[in-house]
Image (cartoon, grey):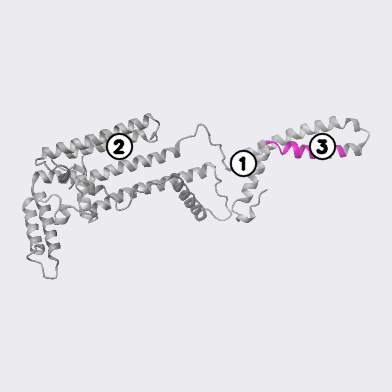
Amino acid sequence: MAVSNTSCKFRHPTRVIEGSNATQAAGWVQSVLYSIFIRAGDPKPLPGSPRFIKHRRNILIAIYAAYFAFTIYEVDFNLQLSSNAYNDLGVPVHVDESGLNSRFRKLTVRYHPDKIGPEVDRDMATNYYVHLKHARDIILDPAKRFAYDRFGPDVFAQCRSCSTIKDYTDNALLTSGTTYGVLFLFLIGANALGFLTDGSYWRYVGLIAVATFELRTALRPDHPTFLSKYLNPLVESTNFRPAYLPFQIVAIAKKASISLAQFLALLMPLYRADSQNPAKATDDSDDTRHKQLDRLGTLVQEINKDASRLLELESIPYRDNERAKSELREALKKFMVQNVVHQKDEVRNAMGEVLKRKRAGVPHGAVGTT
């Protein structure tokens, strides 16, 4: 339904978390947490390892969840700042006619232009009293009160010719039907073109849920049950904030559905496996290291056997010259080590892992390049 423009305005522009900014923040937070919870000298998870990726993902989820919670708080905060007929009069949302008239008589004694002191601006006092009287008239009129509670104060400007509950309801249904229809067509078109595919299912679910809730709020004569029986009694008992009106809950639900869709769109890539560039396992556990050492030892033994056979073959012409045979063997060993063993991928990877562990945690100037 048509929701008050006042309730949807923000004093600050809507904030959007960019992936690069969130990643930078997550990297900074991860570095701080590692410095706090990992003792000096202990190895930190290497970038790209499963532990490092898991920690980075959890930090990003916490950042996105905090942003989601902040957007809901921002909407609620601005709703409290906006004008509300019940709050201005100081009456509960379920006030009856006698209670309202009793309260207004007390306000008249305090704020009527004829009863204010000479030091108060008369024009300002008159405008404020007219505002209070207008709020009282809205609550006393059953049709206007029905429309105000469900669609917000701007519904009177949007439908000046409306006078009955049916008039306000028909106008709101037409406005909301057009809005949700355009949104559905936009999402279908965007998905067909390959856009907004992350979390597309939940976008549709959220849109249908909000539309259903708004439709129920507009067509029923009573307020939603969870609002009147659970939420409002809770906030009133804790004095956390004034009681909610249905149009305020609808505004929060709309913002929550949008923010939740953004949250899911940011969250899903963190769990999606990249089929084109599969991540290589870089587990740095003790068991994995032992397996790597075993494979390296087997490789060295095979190379030694090959080198021995090659040395025997190459030294046949020098059987009678032990000195020349010895020099040839030394030269061949150096050749095998420098040009064969060091070129093996497993040997180079093992050497690289050792150098990384030695350089981890040292000052930047001491890292070196070799």
Residue 332 disc label = 3
Q: Are marks 3 and 2 in contact (CB under 8 Å)?
A: no
Residue farthest right in this picture: 320
State which tag comes first along the sequence, 2 or 1. Answer: 2
Nearer to me, 73 or 360: 73
Most prominent secondary structure in the magenta stretch? helix
> Any mark on residue 289, and which?
1
Say which mark, if any, is on residue 206. Answer: 2
Q: Is residue 19 above or below residue 102?
A: above
One can see residue 220 in this view = no
- The residue sitting at 91% across, 37% down in the picture is 322
Circle 3: residue type: Leu
Q: How far is mark 3 from mark 1, CA to CA?
A: 31 Å
Query: Sequence order check: which comes first, mark 3 or mark 2?
Result: 2
> Gap in Å between the C-alphas at discs 2 and 1?
48 Å
Cα distance in 3D space between marks 3 and 2: 72 Å
- Between 159 and 261, the one lying in front of the other is 159
